[in-house]
Amino acid sequence: MLMVRAIIRPEKTGVVLSEMLSAGFSAVTKLDVYGRGKQKGIKVGDVYYDEIPKVMLLCIVKDEDKDDVCKIIMKNAKTGKDGTFGDGRIFISPVEEAYTISTGTTGL
Amino acid sequence: MKEVMAIIRQNKVNQTKEALVNEGYPAFTCLKVLGRGKKTIDLSIIQDIVDAGEMPVSTVGEALTESSRLIPKRFFTVICNDEDVSKVVSIIIDNNQTGNPGDGKIFVIPIMESIRVRSGEKNADAF
């Protein structure tokens, strides 16, 4: 199992979530986060805005589904044809165990 | 070290906190999150709500047509030693289980390193 954490633009959340749903990845958690990237935030005049609001989508998937999820997120969270700075990032980390609380069973 | 991440119901946080502190795991972090699981909402329940007049139809309609409908949850994380993982998981399950879908999920993730900011102590000393 892998945890896919995607930091995307807040306005792209709806599209990404509905595309994930139609591709069969319904389970997802959304967090509102603030951050900056390699571009050191946005410079407007003399002021740097380095706490830019983003949305973090957290999704635990089977190893073989990772590429599909990443593709869906990358395709839908992109702005413009080739993408722009600030479209976000995807991080993947291992998950060792998963439990469903209502039944107490292990696994996804 | 492992991170036990649990996504639980909002009204179960206090109970979980208390149970964990009684068992000797006082440290935790809790976040407000929105999410959805594998189960889609049962439409017949919503029809009942509309019929009973508990909610105005417009609100229900809006919530239904929105494809990215999410439910508020609490995201509860505990960092613990490898050998404590099963105990923490069982405490969380015992205190959050209502038997209905929507009770949440628990994920266990490895943590490579932990550092205490105050003193710079590392790993096992840091908690």
Image: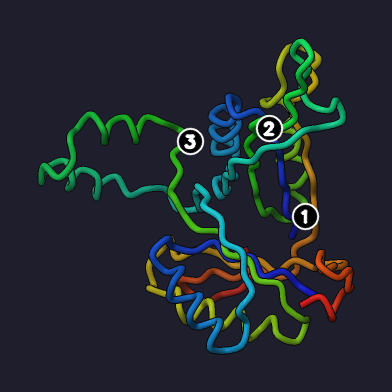
Pointer 1 with pointer 3, Cβ within 8 A: no
Q: Residue furthest bottom?
A: B23
The residue depicted at 51 percent of the width and 77 percent of the height is B93
In the picture, the quarter occupied by the N terminus of chain B is bottom right
Chain letter of mark 3 equals B
Which secondary structure, mark 2? strand
Q: Which mark is residue A63?
A: 1
Q: Give the CA separation, mark 2 to mark 3.
A: 15 Å
Q: Amino acid at mark 3?
A: Ser
State which chain disc 1 sits on: A
Relative image position of residue B14 (x, y in whole percent): 44, 72
Which quadrant of the figure has residue B114?
A: bottom right
Eye-nearest disc, 2 or 3 = 2
Classify residue B15 as left or right of residue A20: left
Q: Of marks 1 and 2, which one's residue comes earlier in the chain?
A: 2
Which quadrant of the view contains residue A21? top right
Measured as percent of width and height from the top left, residue A71 is found at 75, 33
Quadrant in the picture for residue A34: top right
- Whether tag 2 and tag 3 are in contact, CB under 8 A, the answer is no
Q: Position of residue B35 (x, y in %)?
A: 51, 48
Residue marked by disc 3: B68
* Quadrant into which the C terminus of chain B falls: bottom right
The answer to whether residue B51 is above or below residue B62 is: below
SS for dot 1: helix
Relative horizontal placement of residue A41, taking residue B86 as reference (left or right): right
Check disc 1 and give the amino acid type: Asp
Marks 1 and 2, how far apart at CA: 22 Å
Residue linked to disc 2: A8
Q: Look at 50% across and 47% down and name the residue there.
A: B34
The one nearer the camera, A75 or B35, is B35
